[in-house]
Image (spheres, grey):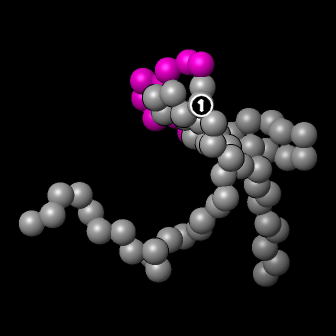
């Protein structure tokens, strides 16, 4: 029996392009942050010595 879970892309809720970089600080626990950016909020994911970021906007839903 294989270890882990099988990945099924058709079940993805959303997929975002992210800019990845190395950090000078080590993050012990996986951290999800929303921080202010120049053109709107930035979603930042940090873990170990890696950071991934992407800008996003919340769409207005009309009823």
Quadrant hosting residue 50: top right
* Quarter of the figure with the N terminus: bottom left
Instruction: Identify the magenta region.
Output: 24-32
| Residue 32 locus on image (x, y percent) | 56, 39
Q: Image check: 49 left or right of 41?
A: left
* Quarter of the figure with the C terminus: bottom right
Question: Compared with residue 27, is residue 20 higher up or lower down, i.e. above or below?
Answer: below
Q: Residue at x 59, y 31 (%)?
A: 22
Q: Which residue is mark 1?
A: 22
Observer-nearest residue: 6 or 20? 20
Q: For the residue carrying disc 1, how many other residues have a C-alpha within 10 Å: few (<14), some (14-19), or many (20+)?
A: few
Q: Residue at x 27, y 63 (%)?
A: 5
Question: Compared with residue 8, is residue 45 higher up or lower down, i.e. above or below?
Answer: above
Local SS, label 1: strand
Question: Does the magenta stretch mainly form a helix, a strand or a loop?
Answer: strand
Observer-nearest residue: 18 or 57? 18
């Amino acid at each position: 029996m294989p270890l882990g879970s099988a990945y099924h892309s058709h079940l993805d809720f959303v997929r975002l392009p992210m800019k990845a970089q190395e950090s000078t600080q080590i993050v012990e626990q996986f951290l999800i942050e929303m921080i202010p950016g120049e053109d709107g909020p930035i979603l930042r994911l940090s873990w170990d010595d890696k950071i991934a970021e992407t800008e996003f906007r919340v769409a207005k839903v009309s009823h």
